[in-house]
Image (cartoon, helix red, strand yellow):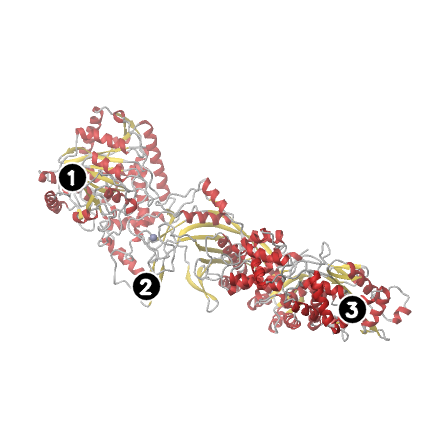
Amino acid sequence: MFQSFVGLEIHIHLLTKTKVFCGCKAEFGDEPNTNICPVCMGYPGVLPALNEKAIEMAYLVAYALNCKLNPMAVFERKNYFYPDLPKNYQISQFRSPVGTNGFIDLKYRNIKKRVKIREVHLEEDAGKMIHAGDISLLDFNRTGTPLLEIVTMPDLEVGEEAELFLQNFRRMVRYLDVCDGNMEEGSLRCDANISVNLRGKGLGKKVEIKNLNSFKFVRKALNYEIGRQTEIIERGGSIAQETRLWNENRDVTESMRIKESENDYRYFPDPDLPPFRPDDLFITNIKNRIVEMPEKRRKRFIEEYGLTGLQADFICEEKERADFFENTIKLGADPENTALWLASDVKKMLNRYSTALKGSRLTETRFFELLNLLKEKRIHGKIAKQVLEVVFKEDKSPVDIIREKGWEQITDRTKLSAVIEKVLKENSAAVQAIRSGDNKPLGFLVGEVMKTTSGRADPGIVHDILKEKLSLTFIHIISMGGAITGELTDDGTVVPGNPDIIIKQVEQKTGFSKKIRLEEISISAILSEEITPDDWSSLIFRVADLLNSQDTSGIVITHGTDTLAYTASLLFWLFPQPLIPIIFTAAFSPFTEKTAEKTSNKMSRSNAIINLSSSIEEAAHLSPGVYIYLDDRILSPLNLKFEKAAPGGFRNWNLKQPVFAGKPVKNVSQELFSRENILKKLKTAVNNTFLVKTFAGMRGDILIKMMDSGITNFILETYDTGTANLSESPYSLKKAFSTGRERGVRFFCTSQQETTIDFSRYITSRELWKEGAIPMGSLTAESVYTRILACYILAESEEELINLMEDTGAYTY
Amino acid sequence: MPEWDKILSNPEKFKKWKEAAVFLDKNIKCFLEFDPEKGIKLSGTGAPADRPETEPADKPLSGIPFAVKDNIAVKSFKLTCGSKILSNFVSPYTATAVTKLQNNGAVVIGKTNLDEFGMGSSTENSAFSPTHNPWDVKRVPGGSSGGSAAAVAAGLVPFALGSDTGGSIRQPASFCGVYGLKPTYGSVSRFGLVAYASSLEVIGIISKTVSMLKNVFNVMKGEDPLDHSSLPAEEKTPAGKTAKIGLPKELKSIELYPSVRKTLDSTIRNYKQMGYAISEISLPTLEYVVSAYYVIATAEASANLARFDGIRYGERDFSAENPEELMLSSRNRGFGKEVKLRILLGTYVLRSGFQEQYYLRAQKIRTAIRKDLQKAFESVDAVLLPVYPRPAFKPGSKEMDPFSQKLADIFTSTANLAGIPAVSFPAAVEEGLPVGMQLLAPPFAEKLLFSMCRDYEKVFPSPNPPDNYFNRSI
Ligand SMILES: [Zn+2]
């Protein structure tokens, strides 16, 4: 078993106006050799003069990285000859840098880790040498620009982690406004060192990798290098201590030079620069300048404003965006709406006008005004979007816009009642249809009202009034098959039946008759074990539709027991905050007139009627949420386990308290829920996903065959808290993981036991994580599987899909 | 005494002076560049920021000519450092110390010869030509500021700037019979002084009179934002006549040339007569001073001289095939033997794993000598030492080989390691050669040194060499 150690050396260009030891402009994109002077050109007799802004920024970064701040920072000369280094020594720091012993906390694949920072030191950059044919050209504009080097301890293990570390670090320095963090332009540069060794044997031979000028290259190069070194050691070879370059065209690292011994830079304190001793005032200023770091802010936004992890990610990505968000909240806006608008319509507008939030026509005050108009129902969503467009187009405040354009919503009930009365009179056929149980024309009626009011009618009030006038509140029963609506044939087998029979029984029993609507989702031909993506997409679409229609006070879904855990959790992921109760129910044997008459044995009597009747009754008074109702017991849709021995045949795993509603996986507009869209995405999800239970003697190559046939997501039901065989044998997952990583295949881990996945307990589980497995906390395989389906529906990109999958914090109970 | 402030403005006097200077320089070769007309044109043209907004009507150094050692930058003048590698280098800027003098009316008339990059004690290590002692052209003027000392002694200028890393001002001043001040480290900006050993060296003054020494120092001193090792020159009040002079007892066991020993004794006598108290002190670390000095100086030099690579300026080997070869070859051709020796030594002592043994140990000795002196200054106001164990010697290795020249830095390099001010003053003429003595004082006590030198000047002013401008101007 191998262990890998990755450390990073990051260089950032500080955003000072002038160079670190002279007064030249610190801009290196200008005409070559224009920002130079005798000092940075190393002319005879000149002396360096430390730039105060640069040393301030250096201490600021060290402080932000939780370093011990040095009371005496010493500049030293690092001696080496190179044509682009005018003095042939670099002023740097060695024995007494600005900061030491810091850390950044990182969370990758749901595992938390503290990455230690060895030191932060300030130095000057060198120039640039360009070889053009047989001549060499030198540009000294970059010479002497302030560079801050951050060196981590070898605490990282895989490329993805290093990439994440760098992204976090970049966000931090951008927050601090000390570096623009642009890797392509070289203002943030990264070298990595890596060593691989047998686990427990400590560090191996160190290999340095250079030329990593993007986050992606850092990840790819490190993973390539881990693989390369592991292979060499496995073959019994030894690693050469060397410097390698990342070749982005071939996706490999290549040897640059073998290091016989370390370079001797003959460091000694620069006599031209006295040690920098920060006084109390300096340190106070540094502490005052510190801003809340992105990770901390992100966490706070989740806790304080109830944002989801992904929302917080988006808001906190840029400091200016997070500031804008928080300023808007301070004015009184609702956090979730603010986040939602920022991530969707505001983002769209900023892209359209290619402008940054800061300095755009949308000020915090205007934004709050817009959200407030919406909240006070003076405008509705569609109008709000139009108002936002006008803000950007005409540079006016939302209040002025709606006044000028006459877009204010009509909320006056009497006024709207009059309009609706007129519409109903003119459309008596539609009214008739609805009254007789067909609510399809409802949308048409709403449309007519909106048309009459040029879109200004408050849709909510219109619905309310319509409901009132048409006496529309129904409990919808959706039949998804299963024994509950099945039929028992004479030979004792259960076949799909006619749900009407049971409904009649229920109507008699509950007296709800006029308030119940029954519909079937292409079920009559199947039992629940035959469920397909088509059935799910129909159900999702129908539920979405019902939730929108506002003529429904509750939904009861009858379902088979075998697949109930899947469908229930899928609906939970998609509709975690329904405005009405959604209740699943099931039965172990069908109701038949025969059994009703003949069976006196209580145990074998069907529970179909009692379960359905009770569910309908519960639907009338349970608070909004998704529920499972079975034999007088209410269970959560999340982590539902079909265990026949359990009372009622079902049990929830790993829940401290039942969960019926929760945070949305992602805030989305309802437009997404078109039937075709859902079906297409569900099919892709189902086709790409495979659920594997690890078992003794399992062969890893079988999983590779599955990858060959298109599987990109594996749910791995591991042993216990997250272990599996990763030894060097065909009966392990080793090869499957390495192949999977090459192909971008994901492994989501759950347990075969009722336990929470904890990768920190066993070496084998640590290894799983290192190889790319994502621990899914306390979620069951069924819930993870449906989360994948939900994420496929909701995500707009591969990257977002992964983020949504890992954002399970809120559901790990 | 010539009226120095009239020489440049009076055409007749100027002509006469210039002719005399050119004539005398043929024998002593103190100038590497002599161009008073250029200097006049540049006078008062320091960086505008450094010039006071309202210049005093009566500038303290108005019209006074001076020479500058050729390792100190003066814009439009060459800056060769006595080295082939910079033989054609013209400085694009002016040293802060020079700018201050120019702003106060003084005029640079030329650049003086030196041992290459200040590395030597005889000015023989100049890549261009050795300088000769005005007292006896068959002898060296001392070094490395030999050109400046010779120019002042020959009466060509009333003062000249030099640099003192381990005695480079005081030793040639002593050899030539003039005053030489090595100020407190940090009291005069080093900006514009081509670095040899940055933590030891300082720009100083060689002059014919004590009052000139004092006036020039008062103009040059002060903190400079361009030199972060510079300090505001806080003045220490001199103790006056009652000042106590300390005499290290270690002097008894150190071998001195008879004329030097004799002069030391006469100096003690003279000061006693003037009312100064003399008491014995101890400097136990004195014997380690030279070793520590050369380890630190060469270590710093190895880095300081790394910049001369022929790429951005200076002599370049055009036949080089690639940048690396260009650097190697330019340095190999451009540096003289003594410079190469010191770069090698410095590189050696800085190697990792060897720093403990050399560089760091030298720093410890440095701390010890500083403490020795601090302790001495608790009981005395100044310390009296010879400048050099012998008077001006003959060139070549017969009388003093390069190694014994280094050992002889024992009395001068002490002040550099401790960062304290020291002055060399003419104390006698023995066997036809001037002999100088040295006074050391606590940091920033230059005023005390001036007053003690002034007292001695009254009984023994700077002697004139046989042939000089004063003879000729009469
Ligand atoms: Zn510059």
The mark nearer the N terminus, 3 or 2, is 2
| Mark 3–mark 2 CB contact (< 8 Å) | no
Q: Mark 1, chain letter? A: B
Q: Which residue is labeled 3 in the image?
A: A517
| Mark 2–mark 1 CB contact (< 8 Å) | no
- Answer left or right for A392 relative to A43: right
Q: Which residue is labeled 2 in the image?
A: A136
Q: Is mark 1 within 8 Å of ligand 1?
A: no
Same-subunit check for callouts 2 and 1: no
Whole-Å distance between the Cαs marked 1 and 3?
Answer: 118 Å
Q: Which residue is labeled 1 in the image?
A: B4
Foreground of the two, A544 or B202: A544
Question: Mark 2: which amino acid?
Answer: Ser
Q: Position of residue A159 (x, y in %)?
A: 53, 61
Whole-Å distance between the Cαs marked 2 and 1?
Answer: 52 Å
Foreground of the two, B443 or B367: B443
| Residue drawn at 76 percent across, 76 percent down | A525
The reply to whether residue A157 is in sight is yes
